[in-house]
Image: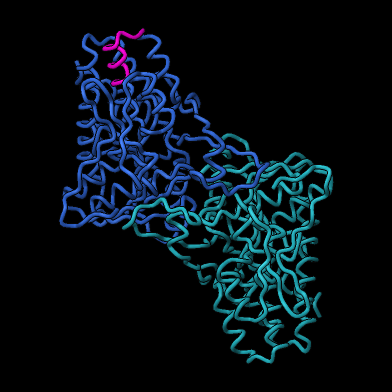
Chain colours: A cyan, B blue
Amino acid sequence: MGLNRTQRPQPVEAVRWLGDRLELLDQRKLPDETVYVTCRTAAETATAIRDMVVRGAPAIGCAAAFGMTMASKRGDILSDAEALLAQSRPTAVNLFWALERMRGAQDPEAAAVAIFTDDLASCRAMGLHGATLIPEGARIMTHCNAGALATAGHGTALGVIRSARDAGKNVSVIANETRPYLQGARLTAWEMVQENIPVTLIADNMAGHLMSRGEVDLVIVGADRIAANGDTANKIGTYTLAVLANRHGLPFYVAAPLSTFDAKLADGSGIPIEERPAAEMTGYGDKRWAPQGVSVRNPAFDVTPADLITAIITEHGVMRAPGRESIARTLAIGRLSTL
Amino acid sequence: MGLNRTQRPQPVEAVRWLGDRLELLDQRKLPDETVYVTCRTAAETATAIRDMVVRGAPAIGCAAAFGMTMASKRGDILSDAEALLAQSRPTAVNLFWALERMRGAQDPEAAAVAIFTDDLASCRAMGLHGATLIPEGARIMTHCNAGALATAGHGTALGVIRSARDAGKNVSVIANETRPYLQGARLTAWEMVQENIPVTLIADNMAGHLMSRGEVDLVIVGADRIAANGDTANKIGTYTLAVLANRHGLPFYVAAPLSTFDAKLADGSGIPIEERPAAEMTGYGDKRWAPQGVSVRNPAFDVTPADLITAIITEHGVMRAPGRESIARTLAIGRLSTL
């Protein structure tokens, strides 16, 4: 690990399409190992999503699209393949968005590739829009991993940070480790170290302390599903960060492509929250530290009410004080641009 | 592990005095192993405190008192022994309180034993006072371990829970795991499982979500140092819980003996916050998960402002909306009772 500073970092590729098979970077093994898992069917892709080989709402959408492409090429029953993929993880709406977009596709492979390349383009556009919100020298807190690993590349929240850096701003990142799956400690820290963006790792419970000491300038996170009113489901702990940012008068930004919006849901109360296995909470990997006999809760996401969100950054611009009207307008613009 | 339900739980003894040596339950190894570390000198005791063999503000005070007893019995230079102990950990004021109480002692062993037995009595008194605040059926969130393991026995925050249970109330506990040292997952969960008090383990970042879903009735924590105005230093993450409890209109209680008050500090800004080693943050035990090259912050405590505290429970009663005057009055009553 660690990067020789004379080398340029290799771009991170979470999802690789090879024409007949899908390669997914096994994010469970990062940062220790860089290993790809090969999927040749929709079922294998669904398993990889469920087991978190690939994670991050946009990357899940891309993987599902290629899963449907393989089902189509193999002549599988498409409704069965779609059902398998739809059951893999419940919260990220990008999964269902991608399945719907694939459903009507004349050329599934072309449609899946378009989902992938559109996502990369969206991340770069979010980066350009979002970078305007980042002050010189900003100390930016982020949660989980909303980076290249969570998307077709560049990232949503980390894409904004990358674009700010590319615009010449000296920024630094505070990465919350993000228990229980440690996406912050393992993935965000790794992405930032690879690119020589200064990154400081903290436990999730330290965020409030750092804010109270004036050591944080803003918070930026990704999203797994955004309701029509702006309520946002994201990795567990996001809601707490929004409450803390509000108390400390800090901007709280969400970066997400339009594929993350679920216009059918009036508000966040309808977003299904995935409960993950207990084993993730009683230890990590093969290490167990909790006593036998303890009960466990393991909700993987929480919902941040729209009124705690300073702005939502999409590929179509920055929505300040997001609400029903501004979101409907942005979604309409998005539909126009894909006609 | 796990308890045969026909057995009565053994009382937990974190600190055992054996007349010529001190035995400390090695809390780094719980819940996997129940092993005692023997200290025969003040220096060994200081090392055990620094390395967190023993932890919890009141238990640290007891251990330091026995450390001074051993120094006295061995004929060591007492000022050297005291300096070593004083340098072991900076935040918990009970350590300095115990050293001061030992300084003037005619009979050091008797003084140390009195500190120990007074602490146990204080915990039981806090339990009785605090239990009046706990409703039947309460779902009680706690952070870190403020239990028998953190005191001479019974516990502060967990002592209140035990006393509520002993008073016939059906209570259940939500234990925040408390990264990075996992005192909640390892120690609080273990204490509660031992006593058949229902306990649910969560990651620290899940507390806000559970509150937002109406699954928490109150929060109770211990303390490491309370300033004259009620500002309270406790395990990192406590401040965040207080902010969340405030947002959700939930009571936020602190249970601490008078030995935890530092009347010399006007407010919490003067409380020294210990920064612990980076290795605690980049993994757990021999398991490392963060990439090389990442920076780390590891503050072990934070400060909760008094205005977020619903009440402080001491051995002399319940102070609602604690402030400078009520604290001064309680400390004066405490001095009277030790005359």
Q: Is residue A76 left or right of residue A280?
A: right
Query: Where on the picture, by quarter, is residue A104?
Result: bottom right
Q: Is residue B204 left or right of residue A258?
A: left
Q: Main secondary structure of the magenta part?
A: helix
Residue A184: in magenta span: no
Query: Is residue A323 something that shows in the picture?
Result: no
| Rendered view: A236 above or below A74 | above
| Magenta stretch, residue numbers | B65-77
Residue A252 x/y as whole percent: 63, 51
Q: Is residue A73 left or right of residue B153?
A: right
| Rendered view: B92 above or below A303 | above
Query: Is residue A233 something that shows in the picture?
Result: yes
Q: Residue at x 55, y 38 (%)?
A: B279
Residue A293 x/y as whole percent: 31, 58
Residue A102 x/y as whole percent: 70, 83
Q: Residue at x 38, y 33 (%)?
A: B53
Q: Is residue B313 left or right of residue B293?
A: left
Give the quadrant of the C terminus of chain B: top left
Residue A168 x/y as whole percent: 84, 44
Query: Where on the picture, by quarter, is residue A33?
Result: bottom right
Residue B76: in magenta span: yes
